[in-house]
Amino acid sequence: MSNLQELNIIMLAPRGVGKTSLLAAMHEEFDKTFDSAGLTTWVSDSKTLDAIEECKRQLRNMDYRLQKLVEPTPPQLNPWEDEGFFFEVGSGGKKFMKIRFTDPSGEYFKPTATPDQKEYVKQQLNQCDAVIIPIDATALMEKKTGRTKNTEIGPWHETKNDPVRITKLLKDAYESLTRPRLVVLAPLKCESYMKTDKDANDLLDRIKIGYRELLDFFKQDEQYPKVAVVVTPVQTIGHIAFSHAETIDGYTRVFYHKVPLDAPYAPKDGDQPLRYVLRFLLNVSNQSLKLELERAKENLDELEKEVGVQEDRVDSAQRRLNLAEQRLNQRNQLWGPLRLIANFFDDVHTSHSEANDNYTDRVDALKETQEQKFAVQGKADATEAQIQAFNAAISKFAIDCKQERGFAILQGRAKWLPIPR
């Protein structure tokens, strides 16, 4: 496991927005998403996985007014003890990479977080390859008197989603990027806003307004070449409608009810963030794999030339050895006294021994280079097979990635989310 490439995804949102509920919706589509792309996964037990399963259990048993809320992820005494939810990915029985989802407590993102919690968030954001930002869609789209107008943002957006804080965290983390990142804006509990094309496009427009400062930051010269941005609405429960909102002690709580009242837990589009994340991560991996393959092929060319040189040296050493053996055989056929005299003036035994040692050394050097060549060839073949497997998976993920009716690639399509040809 330690030799596998490890890729990391972090859920970034304030308390109560629905990070764990989003992970639950994604996990619900987990097997189908990977199976459809011809990939195998190996999932390990963890506290986060237990939390996901508990979240799904609560959502399945939610009353029609959704009064019993999913418990927010509690902060830990030591944030670094959070191992996250991780799994390994591969094909043909071979594991290629390890992917880790981190779902930190929303308490860590507050200005009042402890120094350890703030440092943990900073390190995670610096290390993670992808960031998923769950968004309370209702806070964007609703106000006390009903749906907001086209250019309006709901009055609860600032307190509920805290875009200012999210923007600051990402600005600090992405100020000097050295490798590509994916940012997924994932509006949640958006069932009411995905019913028609107009509703879905209105939601997309509100996201662009509500996160304008963050999106403008990503478009700056330093960040633009390295950041991909997508919007993937997720209906994390299914069949719910906004009821009302209450603000108590500065914290806004949004209330919903099921439509119809006996509607089951039926999340929708939980696969979309996962598909985009994997499409991005596999593309990024393939870029590095292609460089590895290019270096391996250059190494192979050099080794091929070296094998040719060493084969010539072996042939030359073989000829010298044959000549030495011929002279030794001729010497051994002489009459004993004459042989002793001849050996005194011309030591053919030493010449033969030196020729034999030289031949053996040349053969050993050739074998060592050939073994290096075979090892590099094997690695190149494995890398090429991995690239092909990833290309097939990327193509499948891309085909199933939605890009209309509220879904959109805002940045990085050509460079970090391409479809292999």
Image (tube, rainbow, N blue to C red):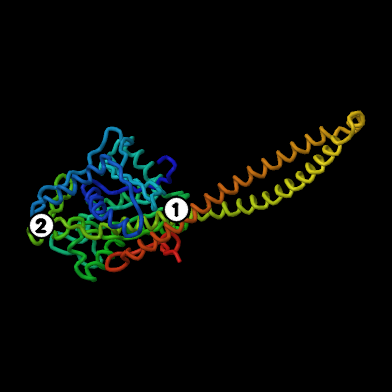
Dot 1 crowding, Cα within 10 Å, few <14, some 14–19, many 20+: some
Q: Is residue 141 left or right of residue 183?
A: left
Where does residue 9 sit, x and y in percent of width and height? 35, 48
Looking at the image, residue 270 sits to the left or right of residue 409; the answer is: left
Split into 4 quadrants, where in the image is the N terminus?
Answer: top left
Q: Residue 58, image x and y in percent?
A: 14, 47
Percent x, y of residue 259? 10, 61
Q: How many marks?
A: 2
Between the C-alphas of marks 2 and 1, the distance is: 43 Å
Q: Residue at x 65, y 51 (%)?
A: 302
Amino acid found under the numbered disc labelled 1: Ser
Q: Height in image: 25 above or below 419? A: above
Identify the image quadrant of residue 283. Answer: bottom left
Look at the image and tell me in which quarter the C terminus lies. Answer: bottom left
| Picture layout, residue 354 above or below residue 407 | above
Foreground: 83 or 352?
352
Q: Residue at x 15, y 55 (%)?
A: 265
SS at mark 2? strand
Q: Can residue 171 be seen from the camera position used here?
A: no
Residue annotated with mark 2 = 257
Pointer 2 or 1: first along the chain:
2
Q: Nearer the observer, disc 2 or disc 1?
A: 1
Q: In the figure, residue 320 lies in which quadrant?
A: top right
Q: Residues within 10 Å of mark 2 (few under 14, many from 20)?
A: some
* Label disc, if present, on residue 285 of the rendered structure: 1
The one of 255 and 300 positioned closer to us in this rendering: 300
At x 89% / y 30%, what residue is drawn?
336
User: Is residue 199 among what the camera can see?
Assistant: yes
* Image: 403 above or below 211: below
